[in-house]
Image (tube, rainbow, N blue to C red):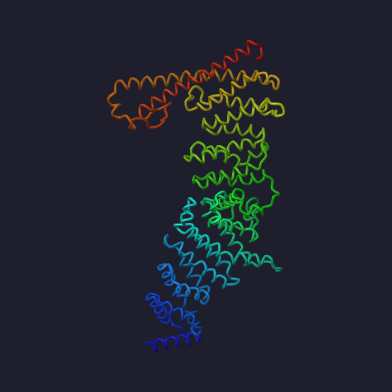
Amino acid sequence: MAGQLQDVIQRWREAVVEDGLRPEDHELFQNAGLMCINQGDTTQLLDFIQDEKNKGIVESMGCGLLASLVAEVLKKKSSFTCQAVITHLAKTCSPMELMLIFLGQVDDLHPDLIADTIVLMAPHLQTVLLRLGEEKAPWVGLALAALQKQVSRLPVPYTKEQEVEDAYGLCRCCSALARFMEPFVEEVKRKDNSEDGGTASDNQLKTELLKFCMGSLREPLLQAQLDQAIDIHKQSPLWHFATDILATLPAIQEPLPGLLFYKALKKREKSDLLTDSTEAQESRACLAYLLFVQLITIESFPAVFSPVFVLQCNMEYIDVLLSRKEESFLLKGLELYTKSLERVEDNSLPVELLDLKSFYSVPQHLVQILTVCPIQGLRERGFKVFQLFIDKLGPEAKHKFFRCMIKTSRHAGVEGYIIKNIKNQIELSLKPGHESEWFVGIQVLPLLRLVLCFPRGPETDLLNSMDRVMESLNLLRYLLMRDMDWQQTSSIWPELCKIEEDYLQMLRVCLALSRAYYTGQVKNMREDKKIQAQEAREARGALVQTMTVKNEKVSDMTPEMQYQVLQCALVTFDLMESLVIRIEEISEEKVKTGTAV
């Protein structure tokens, strides 16, 4: 038997020289190799392919064994001889044929095999690609795209503990991909430093590496929890991967300012990752976050850009991040917004910036976070950055921003907060050295008319509008208390008095209607309790009915809870009325003492 095998091998050796291998020879070779693999006799197979006399046979027919060898390694998790065989084949067989087989191996993997397959295949793919010489660039792109496609299917660790555990292997894959890129990045750097510059192939290699970097910024780094304040980041594979990506970009002659601020890629390349597509914007948003929040490679970023210019550019990326619903996106958007604003001087942002789309949409996203987001930590961060943005606006910009938010927020809590800021700005402008025509001059009247009104007239639901109404009354009370300042600094006092009169008159109408409505609701509930006492006891603690306020369903709640809401409404109306009375008393006192015009 051994003699027959030697005769076959000798015939193969001769056929290789004469280019006379037949299809049945390939089949016989593959069957013999599979038998060695299945029987665990891979040492004999390794000896055979390493024999210099069999080099031609291996070059011609060795690729057929790769799929079985890879499967064997993945099945046993550790097979030194199988990996040695794969390594030898990667150095010996046709590079083009190897690439087709390797790319087939990483396509449409089972989720449980993604990490192990990528960690196994990446070094061998790298070996084959380096053998391709000047023809490697398109194949590098295909390999990176195939690997990245599979990595994007892996769940991203949500906590640092999950990252350390790395149950799905994403961190291992990122480390493998970073090592995979190294020789190609070094080749680009070397060619750029040479006298003759880069060829068309070199430029294509740069483009493929750039595509991979931008894709990696979006997946997985945009979803990853990265925080430089946590010491564990020193051992964090995702942190190191992010650092490698940001270091690669300038290394392949892609300056970070160009990617973030000038979008030079759009002019040069039409790939989806390098234009203004959503994917490209998300990639650049992550780049801005890593640079300005986590400060990765910030030491190499030019310091010539003004804080206002950086904010203006970053607002596009903040808009992209805050428009999403995922916590990781929102958190990164809020942190990038905060860091971009912190470097800007207070009261310095010009009003012209508010004409930019992003300066309108970002505050609208913030309002959604403040009013709808169920995560308290995000709401608290949103509230802080909302006030920080107001602090950075110049007087005219504040005036315009307040008008815009009053008109568009459609939320009494937000409107009340804006009105509180208006009061603070008026108070500041009345102090010597801080005068501003936008808050003590004639310009303040349109703002006051917008605030001190009821857009829905008598139909206003004062319970839902409580935050706005209470802050409006506090503002009105403050304005009346400072009447002498108004008379000395402007000529708007008569108009202000008219605004006050119209506002209080409509408020009294609203109070009367709302009080009558809620008092009637309380009376009806008391009567229902008497008539249906037994049913109420049986249903206590269950969701038995829905309360309607001003023809809108509030929520499902027990009768006791409904009764408490109605009582709170009546107490609120009493509080509003007491403020109205106090304001009217102040006005009367000013008239009697002659201090009011």
Along the horizontal axis of the image, is 86 left or right of 346?
A: left
Give the residue furthest to the top: 592
The answer to whether residue 544 shows anywhere in this view is yes
Question: Is 570 above or below relative to 20?
Answer: above
Question: Is 498 above or below relative to 54?
Answer: above
Q: Residue 132, percent across and down?
A: 57, 72
Q: Nearer the viewer, residue 408 or 251?
A: 251
Question: Is 490 above or below relative to 23?
Answer: above
> Can you say which quadrant of the picture contains the N terminus?
bottom left
The answer to whether residue 272 shows anywhere in this view is no
Q: Nearer the viewer, residue 339 or 153?
A: 339
> Can you say which quadrant of the picture contains the C terminus?
top right
Q: Report how many numbered discs are placed on residues in the image.
A: 0
Q: Residue 164, percent across and down?
A: 48, 55
Q: Residue 55, percent across and down?
A: 50, 82
Give the residue furthest to the front: 231
User: Which corner quadrant of the image does residue 243 belong to?
Assistant: bottom right
Along the horizontal axis of the image, is 515 left or right of 339?
A: left
User: Which corner quadrant of the image does residue 419 belong to?
Assistant: top right
Which residue is found at the position 46% from the left and 62% from the top? 115
Q: Residue 265, percent across and down?
A: 62, 56
